[in-house]
Image: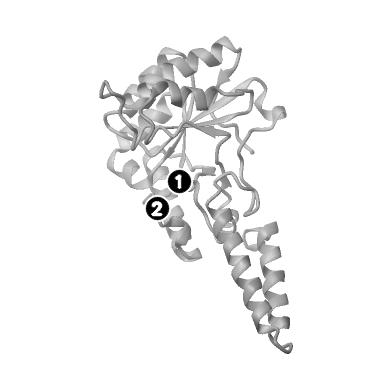
């Protein structure tokens, strides 16, 4: 068997299989059907709840913080949902001004629509990774084959635009199900979530976003912002455009280096 077909079941899936086997045994016992039903229903409640917790490790490997041995003094700004023709160029300009690097988790259909922006991200020394093809909010309800096709399509579009194959994947809104881990193993992708997020797709208060991102800030943290679907401040600017300069200065003041996600996580 090739290594591409060897999958490692995560802990939650192993427990789930055990619960179902136990439920089958109970079902054939006198009056055991009721307890079998309770077990199965409880199991599925736990599975759904874990899928709604983006930083959970129960559904498989999930990078939420870069280990100190790889991070050094680096902090990793990740930017989701682009590329956006109005916001992404401003973000790239700010990053260049501060000589800072970031990792962009881009939506495949937007890369297909704006391939030159994707090329600009790479040309500026940043990383561009896979944030699914469609960015559907029903992603966590899909079956294995549909998830597989969506991620593969995203990989293909990004590679065609940039000549670089993404190594990391972030699920839409961070939501996932039991099939995602197996699909990512097959494709050789690593799931990356975040240490903390600013909720800048709905939070218009720049100070509140910064407070969330900078609280207990330390090396190895993965921070989440958005150039696509960004909320607008009262001045009509994308929140990230006003947050990013202050965030970068805060990092430098704390002797932290904004860097791209390292290879081999």
Residue 34 at x, y = what percent?
65, 80
Q: Is residue 108 above or below residue 253?
A: below
* Quarter of the picture holding the N terminus: bottom right
Indicate left or right for 162 with 165 as reference.
left
Residue 229, located in which quarter of the rendered image?
top left
- From the viewer's side, name the closer residue of 215 and 67: 215
Q: Position of residue 29 (x, y in %)?
A: 74, 87
What label sits on residue 244 in the rendered view? none
Residue ID at (73%, 76%): 22
| Mark 1 element type | helix
Spot occupied by residue 7 in the image (x, y as percentages of width and height): 66, 61
Asked if disc 2 and disc 1 are in contact, CB closer than 8 Å, the reply is yes
44 and 90: which one is in front?
44
Disc 2 secondary structure class: loop
Mark 2 Cα within 10 Å, few/some/many (few <14, many 20+)? few
Which residue is found at the position 44% from the left and 63% from the top? 146
In the rendered view, tell whether residue 101 sits above or below residue 201: above
- The residue labelled by disc 2 is 137
The residue singled out by tag 1 in the image is: 173
Residue 195 seen from this side:
yes
Q: Earlier in the sequence, mark 2 or mark 1?
A: 2
Q: Is residue 99 above or below residue 193?
A: above
Percent x, y for residue 193?
55, 41
Gap in Å between the C-alphas at discs 2 and 1? 7 Å
Q: Front-most of 3 and 265?
A: 265
Q: Is residue 137 left or right of residue 215?
A: left
Residue lying at 45% horizontally and 13% vertically, measured from the top left = 98
């Amino acid at each position: 068997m090739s290594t591409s077909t060897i999958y490692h079941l995560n802990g939650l899936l192993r427990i789930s299989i055990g619960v179902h086997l136990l439920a089958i045994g109970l079902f054939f016992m006198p009056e055991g059907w009721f307890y079998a039903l309770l077990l199965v229903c409880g199991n599925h409640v736990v599975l759904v709840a874990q899928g709604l917790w983006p930083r959970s490790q129960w559904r498989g490997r999930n990078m939420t913080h870069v280990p100190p041995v790889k991070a050094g003094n680096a902090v990793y700004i990740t930017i989701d949902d682009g590329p956006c023709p109005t916001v992404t160029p401003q973000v790239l300009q700010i990053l260049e001004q501060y000589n800072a690097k970031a990792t962009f988790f881009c939506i495949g259909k937007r890369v297909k629509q704006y391939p030159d922006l994707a090329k600009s991200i790479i040309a500026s020394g940043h990383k561009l990774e896979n944030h699914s093809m469609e960015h559907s909010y029903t992603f966590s309800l899909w079956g294995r084959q549909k998830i597989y096709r969506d991620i593969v399509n995203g990989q293909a579009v990004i590679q065609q635009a940039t000549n670089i194959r993404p190594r990391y994947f972030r699920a839409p809104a961070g939501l996932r199900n039991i099939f995602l881990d197996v699909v990512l193993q097959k494709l050789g992708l690593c799931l990356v979530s975040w240490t903390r997020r600013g909720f800048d797709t709905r939070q218009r208060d720049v100070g509140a976003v910064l407070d969330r991102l900078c609280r207990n800030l330390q090396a190895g943290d993965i921070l989440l912002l958005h150039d696509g679907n960004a909320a607008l401040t009262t001045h009509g600017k994308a929140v990230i455009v006003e947050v990013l300069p202050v965030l970068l200065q805060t990092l430098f003041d704390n002797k932290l280096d904004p860097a791209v996600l390292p290879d081999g996580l």
